[in-house]
C-alpha cells in the first residue's frame, strides 16, 4: 500500500512539475525583419544569452527578409510579435490597424543611404537619385520609408525612383558591388563590409549616431522595437512583460560588456568569416542601442512628422501617436527588478 501511495505521489509530483514547466515556458513566435542586421541584434542576443528562458518563455525566432514581411507574419497570424522598426506602428495607424510597441531597443534607426561603388563619381547628393535604381530591404519596409522621406525632403518625387528589394545582408552587398543598383539604404554590418572593400564609399545620409539622426530628422528617432497588435498584447500581458524583461536584461548586458564579448555570443553564421569587419560594424552600432527600453514620446512624434511629410494618408489620418506605444511594461520591470533607468 505504501509503495502504491508512493508511486501515485511520485506520478502526481511529476505531473505537477511538467504542468508547471509547460505553464512557465509560454510559447511566443517573434518575426524579425532581417536577423543578420545588427539593428536587430538584441532580439537574437536575448536568445543566445538564455534571457527568454529565464523570463519563462519558449521563444521561436523567425527570420524574414524585411520589416514589412515580419509585419505581415503577425497580421496574418503566423507570428505573435514583430522585432522591427517602430515606424510601422505609426504607418498602420493611418489604416486603422492597432499596433503597439512595448519595448524599444534602438534609440537611433541606423539607416544609411549608400552610393554603389561604381557610381561614386556621378552620384554626389540625394538629388542625383532621380530616375535611379535604389535598393531597400523590401518594399514597404523601414528602409523604403526612409528612402521616400529623403527623396521628398530633397524635392524629388519618390515615384520617380525605382525601388528594388534586395534584403539586408550579403545579397544587398552583392547587388551594390555588381552594379545592379545605383544606391541602397543599408544597415550594419553591410555598410561596414562595403567600406572595408571600398575606402571611398560615398554615404549620402547616416543615422547610426545621435548627431546624424538629429541632422536628418530634426530630433531623436526610435528604430527597432518589439511590437504587436493591441489585441495580442492585451490578451498576453504575462508574455509581453516577460519579453520586456528579457529585452531589458539583454540591453543591460550589451552596455556592460565589450564588443568582443558580444560578438562571441552571436551565432557564427551571423558573424561570418570576416570577424574583424563584423567587430568594426558592431562598434559602430552599439551607440544606437537603447539603455532604458523606453519610448521617448518626442521620438514617436518625430516618426509621425516624418511620415506626414511623405504620406498624405498619414498626414490626414489624425493619428493619436500616444496609442502606438506603451511604456507600461518597461515601468513595471523597473519597479520589480530595477533593470530600467
Image: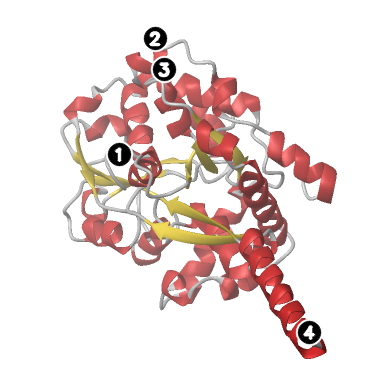
Query: Of callouts 2 and 4, which one flags the residue occurring earlier in the amino acid sequence?
Result: 4
Residue on which disc 1 sits: 124
Q: Which of marks 3 and 4 is nearer the N terminus?
A: 4
Measure how far apart labels 2 and 3 are at the Cα level. 8 Å
SS assignment at label 1 = loop
- Per the model, the C-alpha gap separating discs 2 and 4 is 70 Å
Residue 106: % across, % down: 57, 45
Q: Name the residue under label 4.
A: 6
* Side of 108 where 297 appears, left or right: right
Which residue appears farthest toward the front when viewing the image? Answer: 1
Residue under label 3, please give it. 308
Locate the N terminus by quadrant. Answer: bottom right
Q: Which mark is residue 297?
A: none
Say whether disc 2 or disc 3 marks the residue closer to the N-terminus.
3
Return the residue nearer the eye: 180 or 115. 180
Which residue is rendered at x = 49% and y = 73% of the image? 267
Vertical placement of residue 236 versus 197, above or below = above
CB within 8 Å, label 2 to label 1: no
Label 3: which secondary element: helix
Q: Name the residue under label 2.
A: 316
C-alpha span from label 4 to label 1: 80 Å
State whether residue 224 appears in this view.
no
Q: Which of marks 3 and 1 is in front?
A: 3
Q: Is residue 298 left or right of residue 29?
A: right
Amino acid at each position: 500500500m505504501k509503495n502504491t501511495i508512493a508511486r501515485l505521489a511520485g506520478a502526481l509530483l511529476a505531473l505537477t512539475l511538467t504542468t508547471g514547466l509547460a505553464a512557465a515556458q509560454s510559447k511566443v513566435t517573434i518575426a524579425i525583419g532581417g536577423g543578420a542586421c545588427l539593428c536587430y541584434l538584441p532580439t537574437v542576443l536575448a536568445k543566445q544569452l538564455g534571457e527568454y528562458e529565464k523570463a519563462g518563455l519558449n521563444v521561436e525566432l523567425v527570420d524574414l527578409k524585411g520589416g514589412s514581411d515580419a509585419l505581415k507574419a503577425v497580421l496574418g497570424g503566423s507570428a505573435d510579435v514583430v522585432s522591427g522598426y517602430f515606424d510601422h506602428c505609426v504607418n498602420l495607424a493611418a489604416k486603422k490597424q492597432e499596433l503597439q510597441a512595448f519595448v524599444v531597443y534602438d534609440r537611433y534607426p541606423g539607416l544609411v543611404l549608400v552610393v554603389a561603388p561604381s557610381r561614386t563619381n556621378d552620384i554626389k547628393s540625394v538629388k542625383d537619385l532621380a530616375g535611379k535604381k535604389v535598393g531597400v530591404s523590401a518594399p514597404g519596409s523601414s528602409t523604403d520609408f526612409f528612402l521616400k522621406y529623403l527623396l521628398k525632403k530633397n524635392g524629388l518625387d519618390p515615384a520617380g525612383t525605382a525601388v528594388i528589394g534586395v534584403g539586408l545582408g550579403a545579397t544587398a552587398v552583392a547587388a551594390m558591388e555588381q552594379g545592379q543598383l545605383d544606391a541602397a539604404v543599408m544597415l550594419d554590418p553591410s555598410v561596414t563590409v562595403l567600406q572595408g572593400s571600398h575606402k571611398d564609399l560615398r554615404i549620402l545620409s547616416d543615422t547610426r549616431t545621435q548627431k546624424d539622426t538629429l541632422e536628418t530628422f530634426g530630433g531623436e528617432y526610435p528604430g527597432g522595437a518589439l511590437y504587436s497588435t493591441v489585441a495580442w498584447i492585451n490578451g498576453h500581458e504575462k508574455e509581453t512583460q516577460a519579453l520586456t524583461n528579457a529585452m531589458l536584461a539583454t540591453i543591460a548586458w550589451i552596455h556592460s560588456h565589450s564588443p568582443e564579448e558580444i560578438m562571441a555570443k552571436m551565432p557564427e553564421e551571423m558573424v561570418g568569416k570576416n570577424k574583424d569587419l563584423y567587430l568594426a560594424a558592431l562598434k559602430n552600432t552599439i551607440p544606437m542601442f537603447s539603455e532604458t527600453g523606453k519610448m521617448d514620446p518626442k521620438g514617436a512624434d518625430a516618426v509621425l512628422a516624418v511620415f506626414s511629410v511623405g504620406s498624405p494618408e498619414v498626414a490626414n489620418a489624425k493619428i493619436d501617436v500616444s496609442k502606438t506605444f506603451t511604456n507600461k511594461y518597461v515601468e513595471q520591470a523597473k519597479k520589480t527588478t530595477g533593470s530600467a533607468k
